[in-house]
Amino acid sequence: GAGVSQTPSNKVTEKGKYVELRCDPISGHTALYWYRQSLGQGPEFLIYFQGTGAADDSGLPNDRFFAVRPEGSVSTLKIQRTERGDSAVYLCASSSGPTGPGELFFGEGSRLTVL
Amino acid sequence: TQLLEQSPQFLSIQEGENLTVYCNSSSVFSSLQWYRQEPGEGPVLLVTVVTGGEVKKLKRLTFQFGDARKDSSLHITAAQPGDTGLYLCAGVRDSNYQLIWGAGTKLIIKP
């Protein structure tokens, strides 16, 4: 597709379960970002990839959160032992520039609800 | 502490009115971006301002970057229901990859 694709669009899970959220960026975009957005708030930075490597994971809230991008394209955000406070929309964005963010292209997000 | 303060947080006005929303910080940014986000979608870039004092126009939307590159404003003339959405500003510091996001202004234009 032409844009950033995120799956699933909605995920409902129980507290303590494991979830994976997938992001397929725009083809050729080397930079990939994960954000978390709560209702009425701006995006909260989680992690930034440049190519296959996590250039900055300082936004991950704790060690239950992990993300990979093994081939420099698709990325997966993994959340272990989910908690109710993890409920949010998880946004993925990609951009073409390694020198500054330039324009970020966002997916529609994955809405995670932890019961 | 929010590094970028947006005001107002919420604004509901009638179609045809003018409005201004603000994005303020005590920090200097190398550039600042404005995005609009509609429900169920990701933010979409409207404009990037780079130079202090810069003014950019996008149809009925006018964006201004403060002289000191610490603040910005978005002015909408003759607002239309299609302008409804969450307006987010995001600042870039020192041309690195990180965007500092405001909490957004939720704008509703009533027909």
Image: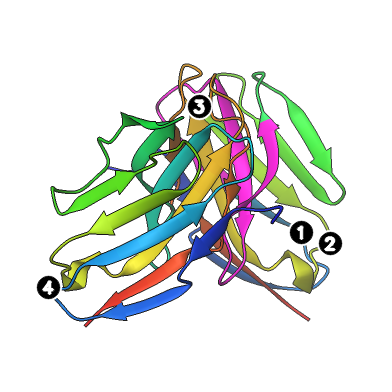
Q: Position of residue A13 (x, y in %)?
A: 26, 79
Residue receiving disc 4: A16
Q: Position of residue B54 (x, y in %)?
A: 72, 24
The answer to whether any part of residue B110 appears in the image is: yes
Q: Secondary structure at mark 3?
A: loop
Residue receiving disc 3: B70
Mark 2 and mark 3: Cα distance apart in space: 27 Å
Judging from the image, mark 2 belongs to the subunit labelled B
Q: Secondary structure at mark 2?
A: loop
Residue drawn at x 62%, y 49% is B35
Q: Are marks 4 and 1 on the same chain?
A: no
Mark 4 and mark 3: Cα distance apart in space: 43 Å
* Image depth: mark 4 or mark 3 in front: 4
Residue receiving disc 2: B78
- In the figure, is residue A10 to the left or right of B23? left
Residue receiving disc 1: B18
Magenta stretch holds residue B37:
yes
* Residue kind at label 1, given as amino acid type: Asn
* Residue kind at label 3, given as amino acid type: Lys
